[in-house]
Amino acid sequence: METLRIFRHENQACPPALSAGGNLFTGTKNDLITCLEEVSNAKTETPVTTCIVLYGAAIVQMLKPAALKTFEEYAHQIFIPYISTKLQTVSRLDLVWDTYLADSLKGSTRAKRGQGVRRHVVANAAIPGNWQNFLRVDSNKTELFRFLSAALMEWFDQEDKQLVITDGEAVLSKPLLPDLTSLAPCNHEEADSRMLLHASHAAKHCQCSTL
């Protein structure tokens, strides 16, 4: 009987559901797949869509600069051509970036990935040789995202298409959208959750199917 009473009290400072060896328990996103499969219907065909919402940070991770020398070359020879191909099949494209807060719980997760070297992102600046190392620095990514957004907005001139890009807590649009109140200002750190807002806005204001 005395033994059973031991388990009525916590035997560590933090609850096991929230901690792992003294660190924050982060969990595994793949564990959600089983739960989602139970409440969703599998599709065998790609639905017809007129709007696409893209996760910008994933695109930057995927599109390596290869032998390009400057950030301007990267924007115009790799990033913008990729976005252009996506625009060919839809009438609206939303590009959503992550933001990086100094006191964020995600900071410890990013720190585990290692440290990189701070590099300023301007058009004629040389692209660092180690792309992944460059992307480990939050300030590098923040400057890169804004640089690519500006380059994309300058390049875009299609009046029959709609471009929407996150810019910190604000939103850029071209042509200018009259109502962005449901999108900005927005303090969501993760693009994952902010993408849902963009999908909802597109469905309500543009009468389009989203992907």
Image: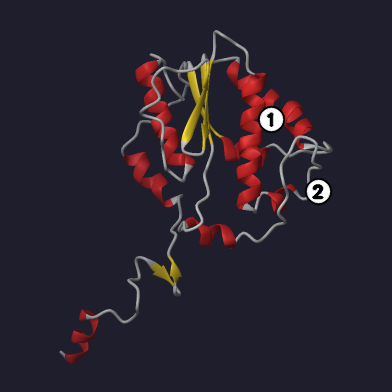
Q: Position of residue 87 (x, y in %)?
A: 59, 18
Give the class, few, some or many, for how many residues have Cα within 10 Å of label 2's Cα (few <14, many ≥20): few
Which residue is rendered at x = 46% and y = 25% of the image? Answer: 211
Question: Which disc number belongs to residue 128?
Answer: none
Q: Which image quarter: residue 79?
A: top right
Tell me: 180 left or right of 161: left
* Image marks 2 and 1: residues in contact by CB distance under 8 Å: no
Look at the image and tell me in which quarter the N terminus lies: bottom left
Q: Position of residue 144 (x, y in %)?
A: 66, 40
Q: Is residue 46 above or below residue 22?
A: above
Tell me: 121 left or right of 206: right
Name the residue beneath numbered marker 2. Answer: 129
User: Residue pushed farthest left?
Assistant: 1
User: Residue pushed farthest top?
Assistant: 160
Which three-letter amino acid code belongs to the residue tagged 2? Gly
Which residue is rendered at x = 45% and y = 74% of the image? Answer: 21
Question: Which disc number belongs to residue 79?
Answer: 1
Q: Position of residue 80 (x, y in %)?
A: 68, 25
Residue 181 in sight from this viewpoint: yes
Picture colour scheme: secondary structure
Mark closest to the chain's N terminus, 2 or 1 = 1
Report, in whole angstroms, how far the alpha carbon at label 2 lies from the one at label 1.
Answer: 18 Å
**Secondary element at tag 1:** helix
Give the class, few, some or many, for how many residues have Cα within 10 Å of label 1's Cα (few <14, many ≥20): many
Which residue is rendered at x = 74% and y = 26% of the image? Answer: 76
Q: Position of residue 193 (x, y in %)?
A: 41, 40
**Secondary element at tag 2:** loop
Q: Is residue 13 above or below residue 189?
A: below
Residue 42 in sight from this viewpoint: no
